Amino acid sequence: MGSPDDESRFVSRGFTGRRRTLEQEAERLPPGQYAERGFPVLTAGPTPAVESDAWGFRIDGMVSNERELTWDEFSHLPFEDIPCDIHCVTKWSKLGTRFGGVSVDVLLDGVEPHGDYAMAYSYGGYTTNLPLADLTGAKAWVVTEHEGEPLPREHGGPARLLVPHLYFWKSAKWVAGLRIMDHDEPGFWEQNGYHIRGDPWKEQRYWGD
Amino acid sequence: MEGTAVLGGLTPVEQRAPGRWQIGEVRAIVDETPRVKSFRIALPMWMPHLPGQHYDVRLTAPDGYRAQRSYSVASSPLDEGEIELTIDRLEDGEVSPYFHDVVVVGDQVEVRGPFTSYFVWRGESPVLLVGGGSGVVPLMAMLRHKRRAMPDVRMSLVYSVRHADDVIYRDELGDDAFLTFTREPPVGWSRHTGHIDAALIAEVGIERGSAFVCGSNGFVESASSLLLDAGFEPGEIRTERFGPTG
């Protein structure tokens, strides 16, 4: 595992590592992560209650055509099965899980964005920023199912963003929309100490990483 | 401010950036409960943290294998040059059993921090702290700091544990702490038992202000619903949840 400070000779006295990951899993774990079997919850505040018939998804901001979808309209869009690994900044990774949802490429169809950045926003007020390049090209989805079941409320149900190649705080729970912008701007955790982009393979956890 | 003279012996300010790995030395270990210990660690690049912030800890084996976890700071930032990390021993964990079974006073440990600025107390008043089990740790940093820096601020702790011997920081819980035992209270306990409920929140008497809730996901869900029912707005309730980590 390469990280810039690998030169340091420090060894923790008496540490052997008793919970090493299986060889076949190790190469799927970004630096500093460990494989977790469960699905822990990380939420900054009380869990919002959003019923699916009240849920809607908007794409607004710097676009030619704003788009607004109801739950019913969303459910008629092309639906994909998304097998993936997810990586939380709090160190756990969940390998070999699957979600079901609609590609952001499909959601952006006909919208014509005029900016290279987006702010994802959620019911309950959460925000997280992403370059459009991280949301397009079959890399991001709005998902409503996990392991074949409706997405549980505590994990962002009825719908959350899924951007598995970035740390999981970017996968906004209870997502309500994307605002297209011509500049990058920190979202909630990005203002509160987490990295502006959050690539787990570069271990971009905190400001300055 | 107490202790500003100590700064002379520390690394210059420009090198004390958060986020750099540094080698600390364990100066004291306190057995809090049969499965919880506190570790006082002196840091060469110490900087003041906000009560509620955490450090990352990294263990390295001789062959280069590494494991990392995050732990909340339990001490006040007025303890210059040192931090206290309180660590719950998780049986199937990797980092917490190392701290419990291997680390002794004088050992070196690699850490970096302090990190994140959401679950932090910046002097708001009044403040209601609600902790379950080892979720009390970041709340203790707030309570300890309040007592030393802003004693007149109204801050109370509601603290839920299972058994009589699960109480962390037992000797520091005063009139500002409201304990409840969900399984087995101490012999002769005549106050609240069972899960935190509306009656216990009402007994504390803080209905608005800032609330900090920390514990397992289930604990945080039920405690934050109680606070919403008691009159807190969603934006007044900050939460920190821990899943199985170790």
Image: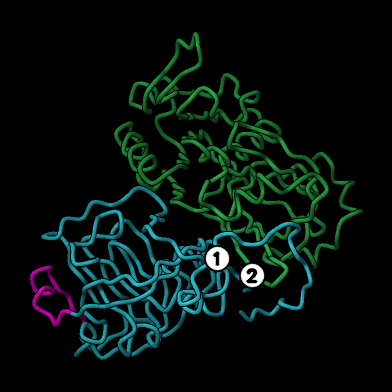
Q: Residue at x 69, y 65 (%)?
A: B60
* Residue occupying the point 33% across, 31% down: B230
Q: Is A116 positioned to the left or the right of B133 in the image?
A: left
Compared with residue B101, is residue A153 higher up or lower down, i.e. above or below? below
On screen, residue A188 versus residue B121, left or right, reads left
Residue B87, given in percent of the width and then of the height, sits at 61, 44
Q: Amino acid at mark 1?
A: Arg
Could you tell whether B8 is left or right of B30 in the image?
right
Query: Which chain letter matches label 2?
Result: B
Name the residue that disc number 1 marks: A20
Residue B78 is situated, as x and y percent measured from the top left of the image, at 75, 42
**Residue name at image x 63 percent, y 40 percent:** B141
Category of crowding for the residue at label 1, using alpha-carbon neighbours closer than 10 angstroms: few (below 14), some (14–19), many (at least 20): some
From what the image shows, is residue B46 above or below residue B237?
below
Nearer the observer, B1 or A49? A49
On the picture, is B19 further left or further right than A54?
right
The letter of the cyan chain is A
Residue under label 2: B65
Give the SS element for disc 2.
loop
Q: Is residue B100 magenta?
A: no
The tint of chain B in the picture is green
- For marks 2 and 1, give the CA distance: 8 Å
Q: Are marks 2 and 1 in contact (CB under 8 Å)?
A: yes
Q: Quadrant of the N terminus of chain B?
A: top right
Start-end of magenta stretch: A66-79
Residue at 44% of width from left, 49% of height from top?
B241
- Queried whether the magenta region covers residue A77, the answer comes back as yes
At which x and y percent is residue A107?
Answer: 21, 82
